[in-house]
Structure formats: structure tokens, C-alpha cells
Image (spheres, rainbow, N blue to C red):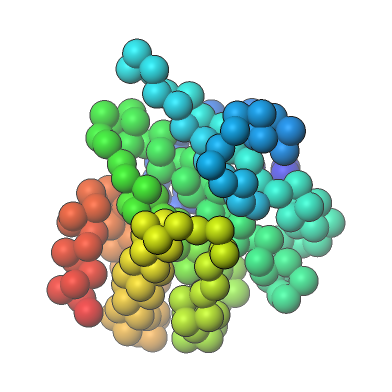
Amino acid sequence: MKTLARVQRGLEALYRVSTGVDVDDYMIDEPTRDGLQPDRRPREQLLVCEHDGEMSLALFVDPRALVNLDRSDAGRLGDHNFGDFLLAVEGVSHFIYAIQCARAERPVSQLELELQAEVDKYVTCLLAIGPDASAPLRRRLFDDAAYEDDLDHDERDRYRAANDNASRYAAWLEGVFVTRSKIPEMLGELRRFYRSGLAAKLGQIARAA
């Protein structure tokens, strides 16, 4: 099974959702992505087009990242594949969440997509590495976050807001569940969070913090 398919299977199992589609069928290469003339060309990008009530999706993930993950064991995270694994999780997270919101006929903002992806990266890595890694993982994901130079002001603010809120939520998860070895209870909390809208997510984080 390819890397993105494994990530998709893991996230769908985690949240008990099913898109019924294969993310690999929606992957596009760099020339195809560039032909769509997006404003930016990052290493991971979900492209969405809505027309006459129909939504079309395409996902680009840097093929070099996928090659690295396929060559290594993505379940064994280390400096050799950590960044590429995060890229894969982010892309698949965006893909699944966009489909789930569309099927529920619920609008979704870019901030909500980014916030959920940041939470997904923390949880996916935590489950892969183990609960003892929570604190250093949070520091690596959130405190050491860097932003692309070509982001405009609004984009940078959106990424920072997603990072800051995910950081607070992850710290709360750690204190309430991880350090107390309550992983099953944490999974229940994560599923409730996943099904909440952006306002409810932000409200819960504010109360938790």
C-alpha cells in the first residue's frame, strides 16, 4: 500500500469516517498543478473548484517526499523522513476533511482546514512514536514552526492562528489524557472535535487553555 493510502486509512479509522474514495486517484503531478495556475506552488496543495454545486478536488504532494517515505518505513519516524511525513499527513487531512464537509453540505474555511491538519499531525505522530514523545513533539511541531517566505499577510496570519490554536489544544490533550494514559478517552475527544465547526473548535480551545 502506498504512503498516502496508508495515511488515509489511518486518519479515517481514527475519526471513524469514510470518504469511499482513494486519495491516490486524486493526485496530480507538478506540470498538471502548474497548468492550473494557482497563486502559490507549495510542496503540498489541495486544489478545490466548485461549479454548479459540484466540487472537484485535486491534491499535489511533492513527489520527492513520497519517494523518501516509500523508501523508508513511514511508521518509523526520524529526522530522515519526519518533515515528509508531516507533508503527507497535511495533504491527506485536507483531502478527507474537505470531502466530509462537502458531503455534510457544511462550508469550510481555509483556517478550519489548517487547524484540523495541525491537530492531525500531532495526533498521528503521537500515536506512531508513543505518548512519552508528546512534549518534545509539541515543541517541534508548534514552537519551532517556520513559514514560507512567499505567504502574504493574510495567509501568514491564518497559518499562525492554526498553529497557535493547535498548540494549545495539543497541550490540553497532553495534560488531560496523554500524561494520564487515557488514550482511548483522548480518541473520543478527538472525534468530537473533528465533527465540530470552526467556531466550536476555537471556543473549546479557548476554554481549555
Q: How many marks?
A: 0
Work out whether 43 lies above or below 206.
above
- The residue shown at (41%, 38%) is 98
Answer with the quarter of the image where residue 71 lies: bottom right
Work out whether 82 lies above or below 50.
below
Q: Is residue 151 visible?
A: yes
Q: Quadrant of the C terminus?
A: bottom left
Relative image position of residue 40 (x, y in whole percent) = 56, 46
Answer with the quarter of the image where residue 87 lies: bottom right
Left or right of 109? Residue 18 is right
User: Residue farthest to the right?
Assistant: 71
Left or right of 117? Residue 66 is right
Q: Is residue 127 visible?
A: no
Relative image position of residue 199 (x, y in whole percent) = 18, 55
Left or right of 52? Residue 70 is right
Which of the two residues, 18 or 85, is positioned nearer the viewer here? 85
- The residue shown at (32%, 76%) is 168
Work out whether 103 lies above or below 162.
above
- The residue shown at (31%, 41%) is 108
- The residue shown at (32%, 84%) is 175
Which of the two residues, 22 or 98, is positioned nearer the viewer here? 98
Relative image position of residue 50 (x, y in whole percent) = 40, 23
Work out whether 71 lies above or below 16.
below
Which of the two residues, 190 or 88, is positioned nearer the viewer here? 88
Relative image position of residue 83 (x, y in whole percent) = 66, 66
Q: Quadrant of the N terminus?
A: top right
